[in-house]
Amino acid sequence: YMPLSKHDLLCELKNRVWFKTLPSTEGPFKALNYSQLEPKDTLYQLHHDGFKTCAAVMNSAAILGSNLGEEIDSHDAVMRFNSAPLSEQYKADIGAKTTLRLMNSQLLANPSYNFFTDPIYRNITMIVWDPAAYTGDMQEWYENPDANFFSSYEKRRKMFPQENLYITDPRFYWELWDVLQENTEAMIHPNPPSSGFQGIAIMLSLCNQLDVYEFLPSERISVKCHYYEKWNLNPACTLGWWHDLRAEKYFVLRMNLGTKDDVTKKGKCYTMSNTSHKR
Ligand code: NCC
């Protein structure tokens, strides 16, 4: 085990981890005619010029009191995660702009998230992922996803054909997992990386500069889980359990080109990607 330099870690992510959406011409998705159903443009056709500056904003409660809203909104593109709300009461700390939203499949499968009615899921690019087996059997996955989201996807695509809603090809996050494991001294859990870490990898393929907020916890770190849930107290939200967040966060810290002060005061890490890929 030889720790890589900042630059080499970033190169590993850029060269070995390729974000891709569902192969609509493979297995069950071919039979189901998903190529008719999926958005006309791929994610990289849609955002073909890439972005100069991007922000990825985690759902951590530690962002409360940060007053980073304006700074976050000043980026060309902002990625948010899962059900992260955008109401007026949080605006000063988290901003109001969303360009992309990365969601796990629970958001579509469980009606309590109001995926079909909540305006936070409108007029933005959305990507949904579901934990599939490492072996990558698409038929098995379609028949037995972790959360039953395929029917919601199909319904939503028919409802809003103009919308840009994508499903992640599981091979993407397993490639990311491989790179994470190879660059972590200990064995990590054999589960897909968290939405935040997946989002960082996606944004690095779209952005020249990426600022990540409250993935590396700031000095506002607490047992509170999300900025939008007062009584969800659980240190595992920040430190990890099902997802190996410690490995993910240490990886991001090792790529960080910003100052120590930005991490402690703002919970901010930054990376430069120079070449945004056109795929
Ligand atoms: O909590 P979650 O994560 O939605 O968070 C999105 C990203 O922010 C990071 N985070 C969050 C809170 C915190 N205190 N510190 C953080 O660093 C997370 O690590 C994550 O990268 C997920 O990754 O999809 C996850 O989703 C939730 C849950 O499904 C959704 O919030 C919808 O309710 C999972 N929690 C549970 O299933 C109970 C979580 O394990 C992973």
Image: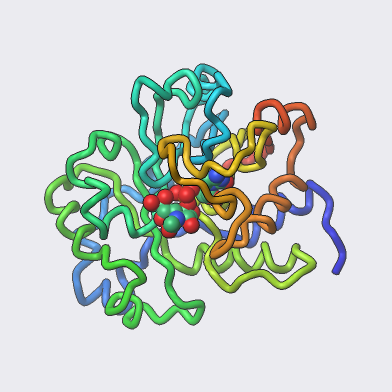
Q: Is 77 above or below relative to 131?
A: above
Q: Is residue 104 visible?
A: yes
Residue beneath the point at 55% across and 68% down: 174
| Residue ranking furthest to the left | 159
Residue 200 to residue 78: above or below: below
Residue at horizontal 75 percent and vertical 32 percent from the top: 258
On the rendered image, what quadrant is the N terminus found in?
bottom right
* Residue name at image x 15 percent, y 57 percent: 155
Q: Nearer the viewer, residue 208 or 104?
A: 104
Quarter occupied by residue 246: bottom right
Protein image colouring = rainbow
Q: Nearer the viewer, residue 203 or 260?
A: 260
Q: Percent position (x, y) of residue 80?
A: 44, 39
The image shows residue 199, relative to residue 210, as above or below, that is below
Q: Position of residue 33 (x, y in %)?
A: 19, 69
Left or right: 157 as drawn, with respect to 140: left
Q: In the image, what residue occupies the spot 51% across and 63% down?
A: 172
User: Looking at the image, how many numbered discs can be counted on the residues?
Assistant: 0
- Establish if 101 lies above or below 53: below
In the image shown, does 231 or 60 lie closer to the viewer? 231
User: Most extreme residue toward the right, as rendered?
Assistant: 2
Residue 277 in sight from this viewpoint = no
Where in the figure is residue 262, as x and y percent of width and height?
72, 28
User: Horizontal and vertical percent for residue 121?
Assistant: 28, 40
Nearer-the-camera pick, 102 or 276: 102
- Quarter of the figure with residue 264: top right
